[in-house]
Image (spheres, rainbow, N blue to C red):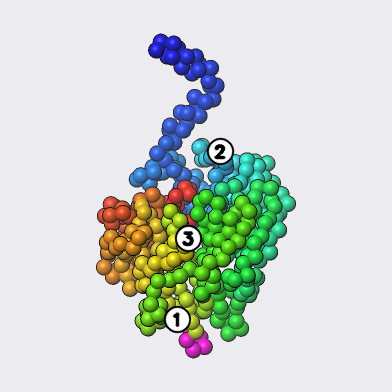
Amino acid sequence: MRLAVLALAVVALAAPVTATGDLAAREKLAGTVLAIESSRGQDYLVRVDRESLRAVSKRVAVGGHAYAWSLSPDGRRLALAVDRANGVRVFDARRLERLGQVRTWSGGISAIAWLSPRRLLGWEPAGLFMLDPIARKRLASPRASGEVVSAQRAGNQLVLLIAPIQQIGPAQLAVVGADGVVRTVPLDRIRAGMRPEDNGMGERYRPALVYDQVGRVFVLGAGGDAAAEVDLARLALTYHEPHRAQSLLARFGNWLEPAAAAKLPLTGSFRDGLWLGDGKLAVFGYDSIAVGTDRVETKQIGLSVIDTGDWTTRTLDENAWGARFAGSTLLAWYQKGGLNGYSVDGAERYHLFGTDALAVVATYGSRAFVAFDHKPLHVIDAPTGRVVGTRRALPRLLDSRFSGW
């Protein structure tokens, strides 16, 4: 026993001094998370307590509004896409100090991913860009044509769902790694894109992009299109036709109810998706049809769970307008108000807030943050539906488990 203790002491003495400092820093930062707070037209970088979300550090102005973020592979640096910078600003993630910035081609950055120590990939209206965030210089840009519908970080790659420019046509999947090589997969059976019309109307198809966290992405077609499964390692593509166990009357039931006016004069179809684990994903969205020459009516498609093992579909709630997933619970809200909680197998756990107009604006762990028109933000425990607090504002957490970006 004494020999074992002595051996441990020798190892401890032999450890580099910097390791002690690193350990102390990690212990100091344990239980906290980086976040973006907004105040008076400006965003601030701050560290908050992971549970209370209260600030525990100084606040550092980022010099504008932050729209995308990514940590370096070792977690020591943070890249923020900031509008007024027309590019990316780099910060020390521990000291919360700005280290520099790199201008990109056009600003308006919608996605960035720090894929390796010296390579940061992003997307802006001008297209893909690659940066060396340490030397803080722009590198040769990878090439991918089209308009990005959505983007997902998948390990050390960035996956982009791309539509044709200013038209509706076959989508394609672009997979880009730290080496800048762009690999593409045409999705001939899935439409995407937007086609403007001279009269101010237009048509849009937006499929959903879902990553399963282990090497597959799914593209869920809108407007009755197929679903695609892509193995990212081999770029192997498989199409599926999800089978909905639903009667014809139920399928068209939504169109028999009063319609909601669309926010934009666009017809078409929109889908969004959530990975639930255990081979299952959720899909929701809406379809819009033209009514007359200057307005559209929008109908929700409801909330369904797809089992990717056999591609059977279970409709959980045909009236759901939007959804989030937290604490093994699907949270659904409605045009008519209120919030329902469901287990993945479809059991209704609770109904909250009557007919209050609301939306779940973010989730973090088992917590969900519910926004209302004229009430403070409510924080609920998603598995039970218990309201655990209220907030006047919600910081955007720089944590992959936070869904509010």
Left or right? Give the position of 199 relative to 346: right
Q: Position of residue 17 (x, y in %)?
A: 53, 21
Q: Nearer the viewer, residue 193 or 108?
A: 193
SS for tag 2? loop
Q: Position of residue 291 (x, y in %)?
A: 47, 86
Q: Which residues are magenta?
A: 291-295
First of labels 2, 3 by sequence position: 2
Residue at image position (32%, 64%) is: 339
Q: Nearer the viewer, mark 2 or mark 3?
A: 3
Quadrant the N terminus occupies: top left
Disc 3 from disc 1: Cα separation: 31 Å
Residue at image position (28%, 52%) is: 388
First of labels 3, 1 by sequence position: 1
Under mark 2, the amino acid is Asp
Q: Nearer the viewer, mark 3 or mark 1?
A: 3
The answer to whether residue 192 is above or below residue 384 is: below
Q: Which residue is mark 2?
A: 74
Q: Nearer the viewer, residue 211 or 310?
A: 310
- Crowd band around label 1 with a 10 angstrom C-alpha radius: few (<14), some (14–19), many (20+): some
Q: Which residue is mark 3?
A: 308
Q: Which residue is mark 1?
A: 297
Report whether residue 34 is seen.
yes
For the residues bearing labels 2 and 1, Cβ distance under 8 angstroms: no
Q: Nearer the viewer, residue 139 or 331?
A: 331
Left or right? Give the position of 160 relative to 33: right
Under mark 3, the amino acid is Thr
The answer to whether residue 378 is above or below residue 299 is: above
